[in-house]
Amino acid sequence: MFLFETIPWSSTLMWLAVVAGLMIANEVARSNKWAALVLFIALPVALTLFVWPTTAGAGSSTGTWFHWVKVYSALAGCLGFMAIRFIPRLSKNRYALMFPAFILALNIFEAVIRDFEVYGLNGMVDGVFMVGGPWNIMNGIAGLLNLVTICGWAGIIISRGPKKDMIWPDMLWFWIIAYDLWNFAYVYNAVGDHSFYAGAALLVSCTIPAFFIKRGAWLQHRAQTLAFWMMFTMAFPTFVSSSSFSVQSSHDPVALFAVSALALAANIAVVVYQIYTIVKRRRNPLTDELFSHLPAYRKVLDANKALAPEVAGAQPRATASAK
């Protein structure tokens, strides 16, 4: 196969099980703040003390600095988002609303650094087979472009109802798809033999809820599914590397180049469209919502019972409000 070695039927079923498991865990965390506190505080504390020092130690495929930073930054994101969701004054505080953008940018930047590191690596490194090359630089640039196109955080709102989801109306489908392409390429470049699950399955598990279950809450879905996956893979690192369900990357330079080129092209397209919107509609990407004129933006507001601007060409809302 082009991206991977042969994928047996058992691994295909396990892939579906991983997607379903992550989506179910995400829904449990959404359903009740007390369940979320157990999952994002009590569980990782127990794993940090009693499990990960053994399973994610030196020599393990999850024993690198990146995996440790990634799990705690994902958990920090989940807890920070919970604070915004359940502490009313934070949902109206412009400085608090910078946190989602900051933690997202930090996670992207961590991966960009790793992509650039892998550029000079070949062979087995920290239990993972690396094939470094120009694709790492291409995808690192794609990640930086994805980072600088984060916009509209001032318009974050909290949905009505007991789940109080964190809704980011300006984070629309084209940015999410560009992120997914970049992130899959990153995982495929840096930990290719993990990418069948840690790339494809993990990204699908947060994109499906964002498009079909709770529109506008992609970042919340992403943080929670990422945290669950990182906790799992640090506890069971051999699942993706040497278990009967593992699927190996083809390590084909053509495949590596192709996924990185696609990610770069998608993110360049988002940058071009964003610049076009900024210039045409005279909007400030640091303070305004850029895409309030689009039907997709209005669908997010409608789905969360929030008020959209009355005029199609109206300026974006200046501040966020809890709805």
Image (spheres, rainbow, N blue to C red):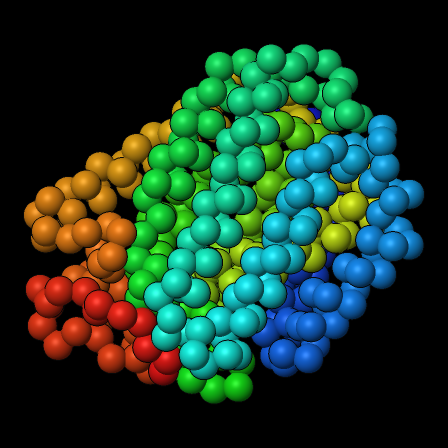
Give the percent coordinates (x, y) of residue 23.
62, 63
Image quarter of the N terminus: top right
Counting from the top left corner in percent of width and height, residue 49 is at 87, 55
Seen in the image, is 214 located left or right of residue 70? Answer: left
Would residue 156 appear left or right of 41 to someone viewing this image?
Answer: left
Tell how many labels. Answer: 0
Q: Is residue 166 above or below residue 232?
A: below
Task: Please indicate, yes or no, whether residue 123 appears anywhere in the rendered image.
Answer: yes
Answer with the quarter of the image where residue 152 lies: bottom left
Q: Which residue is at 59% across, 34% downward?
A: 187
Whether 103 is drawn above or below 321: the answer is above
Q: Residue furthest bottom?
A: 161
The residue under the point 85% across, 47% down is 52
Residue at horizontal 16 percent and vertical 62 percent from the top: 293
Residue 205, horizontal then vertical, whole percent: 58, 56
Vertical placement of 243 versus 304: above or below?
Answer: above
Nearest to the observer: residue 97 or residue 290: 97
In the image: residue 135, left or right of residue 121: left
- Is 121 in front, or is 89? 89
Q: Quick one: quadrant of the C terminus? A: bottom left
- Where does the image place residue 226, in percent across and percent down from the top left? 62, 53
User: Does any portion of residue 10 appear in the rendered image?
Assistant: no
Q: Residue at x 79, y 64 (%)?
A: 43
Picture quadrant of residue 18: bottom right
